[in-house]
Image (cartoon, grey):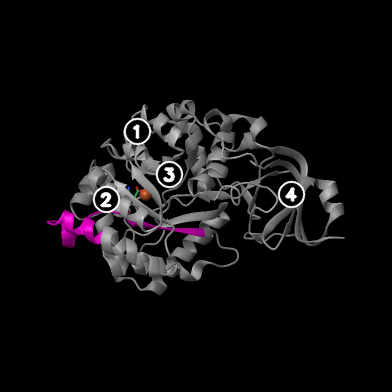
């Protein structure tokens, strides 16, 4: 009898998303979600080796461990494709300032916001940054997240940007979500406030190529392209350097204002554009036709008290691949993709199934990990969420609390349960 490390059985409803990524309306269609009832999943060496009817999977494998899912919903692990989770310090007082009417940009322009986190992060040791990042990753895992994109951007100068990457080195460990590192051009540092061009040159010509020698090496180059951050021209220069040096590209775009960042999708291969509150609905077609994933961050939208929402309906009608992410950062301390799905349902008009697809298979697409993560298929990572609810229709229907009973990251349970 073939052996398995783990068999999860008695799954009431298994949503596999094996046909993903799902474009536009497809993400709402239960026929496209690859749903099985009374299912089982077999795992060996961190990967799914088989899935099918529960009784057959149980009978087919000699399992070292089993897990009885008791008729509940099981989905692929949640993928969080946009976070800033390495940082020191906190900014809880800025929440009160925002509530008094100061805008995110005003706080930033006064040397608060990102600049304040930069000061704290530069002062922190690598060990301290690693400890903070580990705690945050564990909290995310317990809430269902099994892959996390992590950005730099609170160092700004070469040595500190590289320190942020090095803080991730020890975090490639069993039971922790997988990490996709990104080098982020976040803002012009205060040392360069009278020499923007000098900083863009430093970032493009020194920080970008130098990061290739850091361990872990970033997969992505990202730029905060927005009013108060980098202009379209500056962004273009940094992204072009990224391409030349063999990185993949993603972008913060149209969060605080429309300044034309999303137009760059027509010029360069950009895997994902994120935020998009001010995306002109006409540009939804551009993203769809270029295969650029639209990654929406509804909790981040709330944390800047945005007057605008991203055009979710235009993106759906254009047939874009839409993903969700937390944007976990000191301005938005929300580690939970579950809550992001809830907000996508109630603020952006996504259906529960659409929200789940956006947080799994489409979020994996945003990181170009589709095929290996965010879906349940033979050979894919054994990243599974066992929900406290019986069906995908209950995700976002029951809301506001943790609904995750167990999470398997590469087959390892993070909440402590096997039979
Ligand atoms: O994605 N928008 C730019 N950066 C982050 C916020 C970072 C911060 O405020 O520390 C974001 O929202
Ligand atoms: Fe961000």
Q: Which mark is residue 106?
A: none
Residue span colored magenta: 179-203
Q: Is residue 403 magenta?
A: no
Dividing the picture into quarters, in which one does residue 276 lie? top left
At 35% from the left and 45% from the top, the residue drawn is: 252
- Choose between 49 and 170: the one closer to the eye: 49
Q: Name the residue under label 2.
A: 237
Secondary structure at numbered mark 3: strand
Q: Is residue 318 above or below residue 175?
A: above
From the image, which quarter does the N terminus lie in? bottom right
Nearer mark to the viewer, of 1 and 4: 1
Nearer mark to the viewer, of 2 and 1: 2
User: Picture coordinates of residue 394 (x, y %)?
Assistant: 63, 36
At 33% from the left and 63% from the top, the residue drawn is: 209
Q: Are marks 2 and 1 in contact (CB under 8 Å)?
A: no
Q: Name the residue under label 4.
A: 69
Earlier-in-chain disc, 1 versus 4: 4
């Amino acid at each position: 009898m073939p052996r398995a490390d783990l068999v999860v059985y008695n799954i009431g409803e298994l949503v596999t998303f094996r046909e993903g990524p799902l474009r536009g309306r497809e993400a709402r269609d239960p026929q496209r979600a690859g749903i099985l009832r009374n299912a089982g999943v077999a795992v060996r060496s961190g990967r799914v080796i088989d899935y099918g009817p529960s009784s057959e999977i149980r009978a087919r494998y000699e399992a070292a461990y089993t897990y009885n899912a008791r008729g509940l919903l099981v989905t692929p692990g949640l993928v969080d494709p946009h976070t800033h989770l390495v940082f020191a310090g906190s900014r809880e007082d800025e929440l009160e300032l925002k509530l008094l009417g100061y805008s995110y940009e005003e706080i930033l322009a006064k040397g608060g916001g990102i600049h304040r986190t930069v000061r704290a992060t530069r002062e922190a040791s690598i060990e301290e940054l690693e400890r903070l990042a580990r705690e945050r990753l564990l909290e995310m895992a317990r809430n269902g997240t099994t892959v996390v994109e992590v950005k730099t951007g609170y160092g700004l100068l070469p040595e500190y940007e590289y320190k942020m990457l090095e803080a991730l080195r020890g975090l490639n460990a069993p039971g922790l979500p997988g990490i996709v590192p990104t080098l982020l051009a976040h803002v012009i540092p205060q040392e360069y406030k009278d020499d923007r061009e000098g900083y863009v040159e430093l970032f493009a010509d020194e920080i970008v190529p130098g990061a290739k020698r850091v361990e872990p090496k970033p997969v992505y180059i990202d730029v905060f392209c927005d009013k108060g951050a980098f202009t379209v021209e500056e962004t273009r220069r940094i992204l072009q350097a990224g391409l030349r040096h063999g990185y993949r590209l993603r972008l913060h775009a149209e969060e605080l204002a429309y300044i034309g960042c999303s137009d760059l999708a027509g010029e360069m291969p950009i895997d994902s554009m994120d935020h998009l509150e001010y995306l002109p609905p006409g540009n939804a077609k551009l993203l769809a036709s270029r295969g650029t994933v639209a990654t929406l961050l509804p909790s981040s939208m709330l944390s800047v008290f945005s007057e605008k929402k991203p055009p979710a309906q235009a993106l759906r009608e254009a047939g874009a691949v839409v993903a969700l992410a937390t944007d976990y950062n000191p301005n938005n301390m929300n580690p939970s993709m579950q809550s992001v799905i809830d907000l996508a349902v109630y603020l952006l008009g996504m259906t529960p199934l659409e929200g789940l697809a956006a947080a799994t298979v489409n979020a994996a697409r945003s990181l170009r990990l589709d095929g290996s993560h965010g879906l349940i298929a033979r050979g894919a990572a054994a990243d599974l969420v066992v929900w406290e609810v019986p069906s995908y229709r209950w995700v976002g229907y029951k809301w506001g609390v943790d609904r995750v009973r167990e999470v398997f990251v590469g087959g390892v349970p993070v909440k402590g349960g096997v039979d």
